[in-house]
Amino acid sequence: MADLDQEAAAILRANDRGGYTVPTAGLYPYQWNWDSAFAALGFAEFDLDRAWRELETLAEGAWANGMWPNILYRVDDPDYFPGPTVWHAGEAIPSSGVSQPPVAATVARALYERDPALGKARLAALFPKLLAWRDWFHRDREDGAGAILVTHPWESGRDNSPDWDAAMANVQVADIGPYQRRDTGHVDQAMRPTKEDYDRYLTLVAWGREAAWETGRITAEGPFAVADPTMTFILMRSHGDLAALAKTLGENEAAARLEADLDRAIAAARSLWSDDLQAYAARDERTGAFADGITSAALLAWYAGLRDPDHEEALLATLHALFDAAPLALPSFDPRHPKFDAKRDWRGPVWAIVNWMVACGLHEAGHEAEATRLRRDTRRLIEGAGFYEYFDSRDGSGAGGPDFTWTAAIWLAWASPSKEEEWN
Ligand code: GLC
């Protein structure tokens, strides 16, 4: 193993809390949902048993209604806010009250295919929970067209993306009382969401808590509901992966149901196309308005498996425009837009996990040059700055938390030169 491969594996080991991995010590001391899915992808490179364990511990937090929450609070760590007592949610394990993009289904397939003999029984145990989660999205989070609504920016995984600005501006701050943030004690305030954001994040948590986390009602009546390309595309991909796994397990009824739903998922994904942006975009369910800037989530269409002849060329042109505007790709938000902020989480920086998903889709769709560019840039960023949470797309510096689990995982699974053959 090359040095950086060893370093990446050491980060996963160091962030391991015994069956589950924290995203980074200090800033994020709990188990996060899509972080764990990516962690499993990294562990699979050197310890497949441990990789399965990561998904299994994540699944332990699933609610009776099928939802897998975005944070599992297995311990109470005063160094993080908001903790379990703010949410008042969770069943088997105290948790948040919102979900996160279901990358886990896709990762389960990858783990299974690496070693079917090892994976079969574990997959069989996990599958019903993955399916129930997917069914929950369809029951409690769809808009009229079938696109997936997020009821809190944290649910999307892209916490402070400009995609939520307009809808968040309509949230009246209420019921929050005084509170003390902890994130800004770990990293520079300039790399984190603002106080105005936080007041509204907590207002949404208070609303959900008062609604006793009835997730369907929160979607229908809560102060925030936005159709999200991240959720819609990642769920759409997981459809195909779950259908393949269902067949493997002989779950024919589930496989048929998933396949039948695919047409609706395709139409739903298409409903997020914005002619103004020439890209897929978030749309506020309450006002019908599209977001006014291009985010990296738009480029997940290929990852979803969407092949839309009406928009394929335009989307590729949009991707190239972002490549041209950012020395290091893929910026999470359009650098040409006035709201671009090179260091503030989802308002500009590059995220290795997004690069991996977008590149997988590009690769599968035959856009090799673009996929290679993303892989090359991800490698450069990590080689130059280390395993940061995210990176400045202009100068390549690392930002957010250091020694980050998912950045290490993406290195091991994809960006490392040791994976060259597999990806070329
Ligand atoms: C931030 C990110 C979110 C991630 C979490 C833990 O909140 O926006 O996507 O899951 O950190 O890494």
Image (cartoon, rainbow, N blue to C red):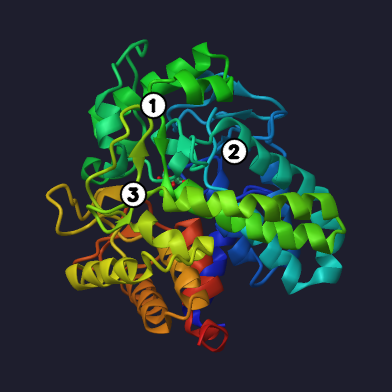
- Residue behind mark 3: 281
Q: Quadrant of ligand 1?
A: top left
Res. 179 visible in picture: yes
- Residue behind mark 2: 137
- Residue behind mark 1: 224
Count of numbered marks: 3
Q: The residue tagged with tag 3: helix, strand or loop?
A: loop
x and y percent of residue 284 in the render?
A: 34, 34
Residue type pointed to by label 1: Phe
x and y percent of residue 306 in the render?
A: 50, 63
Tell me what residue is drawn at x 44 percent, y 27 percent.
82
x and y percent of residue 154 in the render?
A: 43, 37
Tell me what residue is drawn at x 45 percent, y 36 percent.
150
Report the quarter where the N terminus lies: bottom right
Q: Earlier in the sequence, mark 2 or mark 3?
A: 2
Task: Name the residue nearer the viewer: 3 or 411.
Answer: 411
How far apart marks 3 and 1 lie (CA) works out to 16 Å
Q: Earlier in the sequence, mark 3 or mark 1?
A: 1
